[in-house]
Structure formats: C-alpha cells, structure tokens
Image: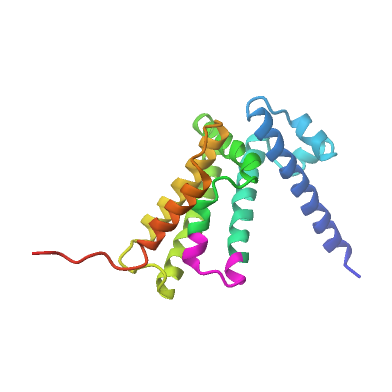
Amino acid sequence: MAEPDSLSRQSSALIRDRLIEAAVQEFGERGYDRARVHDIARRAGLSTGAIYGNFRNKAELLAEAVDYGLAAASRKLGEELNRGAAAADVLEMITAHLSDPRRRMWAPLMSEALAAGRRDGAVAGRVHAALHRAESHLTDLVAVAQREGSLTAEIDAAALARLVLCVSIGGDVLAALKVKSPDPQAWTSSMHRLFAGLTTPGPGPTG
C-alpha cells in the first residue's frame, strides 16, 4: 500500500496535470490575454484556489503549459527511439509531420506563448528555457545519428538542431494563423530528400 505522502504527491501531480491540460485548451481557444483563470479552473473541474495553490499567476501557468507540451514531445521521440527508430528518422519525423492533428491544440498555444513573451518578461524567460531544453535534446539526437552513421559528421549538430526547431515552431505559428499547409505528401517527400542528402559527406574542394 502506498504511503500517505506518496499518495499526496501523486494527487498533487494529477491536479497540476489537469490544470495544465485545461490551460492548453483555454489559451489555444481564447488566447493568453482573454483566457481567465476562473475558466481554466472550471474546465479542469477544480477551484480557482487550486490554480493559485500550484502556480503564482497566469503567466507561470502558460509557461508550464509550454514546458509540458515540449516535454511530452520529447517523450514521444524517446518512445520512437526505444522502438528501434534511427535518430535521423526521428529528426525527419519532427519536420515532416506538419499535418499531425495534435498540432490543432498545440500550435495555438505555442503561438500565444511567443506573443505573450514579447510583453511579459517572466513568460519570455520560461519559454526561452523550455525551448533551450528542447533544442539541447535535438542536438543530442543529431549527435546520436552521427555516431550511428545515419547523418554525416560534417554537419554541425547545434546548427541542424536549430533548423529542425525552426521548422517545427514555424509550422506551429503558421498553423495557428490558419495558413494553408503545402501538400502533405509533397512536404514529406521534400523532408525525406533533405535528410537523405545529409547522410553522406559533402563534395570536397575542386580544382
């Protein structure tokens, strides 16, 4: 049987997760400025006090929601690796799946967080930290792919990680603005060709 303290920690974690999931939906639907703490709590089936018992303010809740989403994405990448996917294939997957239905919820949140960060230094700091962690994880993935031999060692790992992050976040922003996506099959094919070109060293100097 679980100890009372352990049960209390589990309950607290579940409450935080419910609040964050509700915040993701509320921020995505109404935007950061129009979203109200009361509505987030009601959507989670909790009281406003539950929010202030876990988060200092709405800005911290937004930052936690972004962190939560990026951490979930990282876990998904880890699951793909555990299933035997090559690191290079996982990186390609990030850029190729712009039509993933899950973006309908996540994309508006990311767009709102970036906009809110321009006006709120606390939000900016937390969002920047979350993006830095995500980029570091992508850099590690590139390094793994290079050790596996599925990406050439001539590529700078940090530079490729930034490219993948830019494509992913840019896709989120465009999706939030409801900009029409390119043909999914053509986009996926293009990303495949791009990564295929990174599997071998570039041509040496001529002349």
- Per the rendered image, the range of residues in magenta is 80-91
Viewer-proximal residue, 52 or 145? 145
- In the rendered image, residue 84 lying in the magenta stretch gets the answer yes
**Residue that appears at 22% across and 65% down:** 203
Q: Position of residue 94 (x, y in %)?
A: 52, 54
Q: Position of residue 192 (x, y in %)?
A: 44, 57
Up the image or down, 64 lies above or below 156; here it is: above
Looking at the rendering, which quadrant does residue 178 occupy? top right
- In the rendered image, residue 129 lying in the magenta stretch gets the answer no
**Residue that appears at 46% across and 70% down:** 144
- The colour scheme is rainbow
**Residue that appears at 57% across and 68% down:** 81
Viewer-proximal residue, 135 or 91? 91
Viewer-proximal residue, 63 or 101? 101
Up the image or down, 6 lies above or below 95; here it is: below
Residue most toward the left? 207
Q: Position of residue 44 (x, y in %)?
A: 81, 40
**Residue that appears at 61% across and 71% down:** 82
Q: Is residue 128 left or right of residue 196?
A: right
Up the image or down, 48 lies above or below 152; here it is: above
Q: Is residue 3 left or right of residue 157?
A: right
Looking at the rendering, which quadrant does residue 148 occupy? bottom left
Task: Note whether residue 132 is visible.
Answer: no
Q: Position of residue 185 (x, y in %)?
A: 51, 49
- Quadrant in which the C terminus is drawn: bottom left
Residue most toward the right? 1
Give the prevailing secondary structure in the magenta stretch. helix
Looking at the rendering, which quadrant does residue 110 occupy? top right
Task: Note whether residue 199 is visible.
Answer: yes
